Image (cartoon, rainbow, N blue to C red):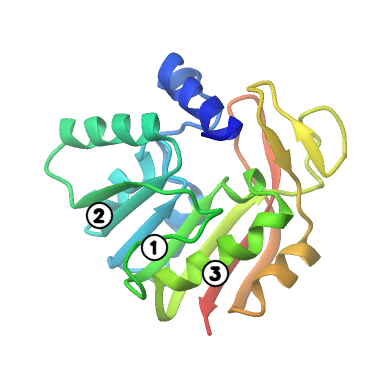
C-alpha cells in the first residue's frame, strides 16, 4: 500500500467527518448549477474520489444512478454505512486507484466528476487518470473537474508542490496545464478560474467542464 493511501486511510479511520478539511455535506455549487440549468439531468453518473460519498448520496436522492469510487478502503467502508443509514439509494461503491488502469465497465456513464481530486494526482500519473475517465464515459458524455489552482495562497507558499496540514502533498495546476491535459480527449466547454469554499477560508481553483469527443 502506498504512503498516500495509508495516510488517507488513517485520516478517515481516526478523524471525525466534521474534522476532515475537505469533507462537506453540501453539494458543490458548480455541480448544483449544472443541474439547475438542466445541462446535466438525472443519469448514470460517477463520483471520482468520493471520500465519504456525500455528493453521491445527494445526487442519488435527485434520481441519479450513482457509482462512487475512492482509493481509500476506509473511506469506502464508511461511505457504504452512511448510504445505508438513509433511504434506499441507488449507489455502487468501489475501491479504485485512478492512477492505475481501472477495470470498471467501459463506456457506462453519462456524467463523471471529480471535485478536489486532481490536485492529489501528480503530472506523471495524469495521463493514466484521464485515460481512465475516457474509458468510463459514453460518447458525448460530460465531465467536470475542479481542483486547486496555482493561484491559491494556501499551504505555505506558491510552489507547484505543497504539503498540507493533513500531511498530504498536492500539485497546483494552471489553466494552460489543464487545457493541455484534457483537450486531446475532450471538447472543453468551459475552462475558468473560480473560488471554492473551504472550512478555513476560500480557495482558488480551476473549473473545467467538458464533453467527450
Q: Secondary structure at mark 2?
A: loop
Q: Are marks 2 and 1 in contact (CB under 8 Å)?
A: yes
Instruction: State which tag comes first along the sequence, 2 or 1.
Output: 1
First of labels 2, 3 by sequence position: 2
Q: Is residue 37 left or right of residue 160?
A: left
Determine crowd level at label 1: few under 14, some 14-19, many 20+ residues with C-alpha closer than 10 A.
some
Q: Position of residue 147 (x, y in %)?
A: 63, 49
Q: Please give the residue where the numbered disc 2 appears in the rendered image.
A: 62
Residue 72 against residue 114 in the figure, above or below: above
Residue underneath mark 1:
35
Residue beneath disc 3: 131
Q: Is 32 in front, or is 167?
A: 167
Helix, strand or loop at mark 3 = helix
Is residue 16 shown to the viewer in this render? Answer: no
Badge 3 density bin: few <14, some 14–19, many ≥20, Cα 10 Å? some
Q: Is residue 41 visible?
A: yes
Q: Earlier in the sequence, mark 1 or mark 3?
A: 1
How far apart are the alpha carbons under marks 1 and 3?
Answer: 26 Å
Query: From mark 2 to mark 3, how far is it between C-alphas?
Result: 28 Å
Amino acid at each position: 500500500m502506498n504512503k498516500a493511501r495509508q495516510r488517507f486511510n488513517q485520516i478517515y479511520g481516526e478523524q471525525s467527518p466534521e474534522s476532515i478539511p475537505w469533507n462537506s455535506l453540501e453539494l458543490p455549487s458548480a455541480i448544483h448549477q449544472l443541474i439547475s440549468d438542466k445541462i446535466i439531468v438525472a443519469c448514470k453518473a460517477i463520483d471520482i474520489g468520493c471520500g465519504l460519498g456525500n455528493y453521491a448520496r445527494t445526487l442519488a436522492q435527485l434520481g441519479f444512478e450513482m457509482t462512487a469510487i475512492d482509493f481509500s478502503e476506509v473511506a469506502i467502508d464508511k461511505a457504504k454505512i452512511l448510504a445505508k443509514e438513509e433511504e434506499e439509494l441507488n449507489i455502487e461503491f468501489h475501491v479504485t486507484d485512478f492512477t492505475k488502469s481501472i477495470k470498471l465497465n467501459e463506456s457506462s456513464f453519462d456524467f463523471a466528476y471529480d471535485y478536489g481530486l486532481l490536485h492529489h494526482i501528480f503530472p506523471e500519473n495524469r495521463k493514466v487518470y484521464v485515460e481512465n475517465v475516457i474509458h468510463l464515459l459514453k460518447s458525448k458524455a460530460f465531465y467536470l473537474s475542479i481542483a486547486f489552482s496555482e493561484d491559491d495562497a494556501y499551504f505555505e507558499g506558491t510552489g507547484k508542490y505543497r504539503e498540507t496540514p493533513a500531511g498530504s502533498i498536492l500539485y497546483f495546476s494552471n489553466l494552460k496545464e489543464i487545457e493541455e491535459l484534457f483537450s486531446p480527449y475532450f471538447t472543453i466547454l468551459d475552462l475558468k478560474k473560480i473560488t471554492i469554499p473551504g472550512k478555513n477560508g476560500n480557495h482558488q481553483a480551476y473549473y473545467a467542464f467538458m464533453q467527450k469527443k
